[in-house]
Image: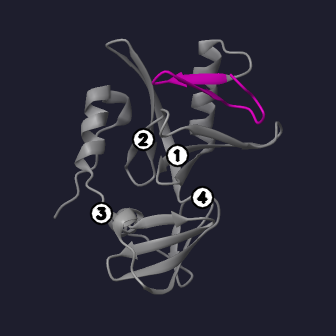
Amino acid sequence: MPYDVPSDLAGMTLAEVADAVAARKLPPVSQWNPEMTGDSGMRIAADGRWFHDGSPITRDAMVRAFSGLLRREGDGYWLVVPYQKLSIEVEDAPFIATDVRVHDEDGTRAITFRLNTDEFVTADGDHPVVVRGDAETPAIYVTVRDGLEARLDRSTYAQLAEIAIAEGHDPLAVTSCGQSFALMPGGRE
């Protein structure tokens, strides 16, 4: 089955983003509880690159397929299929947010992120923006699903900071889907 790359985030309406999210049918990994476990020999580097037995996985379609099988349990990550779950090392976050867009449609203001796996996530109460680190080196994440997060890359963080400055919040924060999210560690909105 050929993969259709979603159109550029900048050219998508909020409704088109919602359609793209709905079109990605992810397997119900949260419902699978296999007894057989093992080690996948896989690692997701802090920069979002995937490796198997030390070699990079260069096929984007493989990365997208594996990313749909990810599950987080406590501090551990697993690739899950109905009959087996395999541990996978994740250095920071399993996804990287590579782009961001603000939508204002029909009175709804939303901030949507595009991930390195061509998934989209809109910041809201179920998908909060989370800040870690300190004031000198903040690390910004958005919750993707079921405890899985995407770390914002430097460019996306800069874009989000510009959005926050334009919103005029002090301390620095952004608003999406009626929720406010601080962009500095310890910041409250």
Secondary structure under badge 2? strand
- The amino acid on which the numbered mark 3 sits, given as a three-letter code, is Pro
Tell me if label 2 and label 1 are in contact, CB under 8 Å: yes
Query: Which residue type does callout 2 highlight?
Result: Val
User: In the structure shown, which secondary structural element does the residue marked by tag 1 occupy?
Assistant: strand
Q: Earlier in the sequence, mark 2 or mark 1?
A: 2
- Label 4 near label 2: C-beta < 8 Å? no
Q: Label 3: how many residues lie within 10 Å, few (<14), some (14-19) or many (20+)?
A: some
Q: Position of residue 103 (x, y in %)?
A: 40, 22
Residue that carries the numbered disc 3 in the rendered image: 27
User: Where residue 3 sits in the image (x, y, percent)?
Assistant: 23, 57
* Alpha carbon distance from label 3 to label 1: 18 Å
Question: Could you give the CA–CA distance between mark 4 and mark 1, rounded to whole angstroms?
Answer: 17 Å
Instruction: Please name whichever residue, 127 or 113, is drawn nearer the observer in this view of the structure.
Output: 127
Mark nearest the camera among 3 and 2 is 3
Q: Earlier in the sequence, mark 4 or mark 3?
A: 3
Compare marks 2 and 4 and give the one earlier in the sequence. Answer: 4
Q: Which residue is located at x 64 percent, y 60 percent? A: 92
Can residue 60 be seen in the rendering of this structure? no
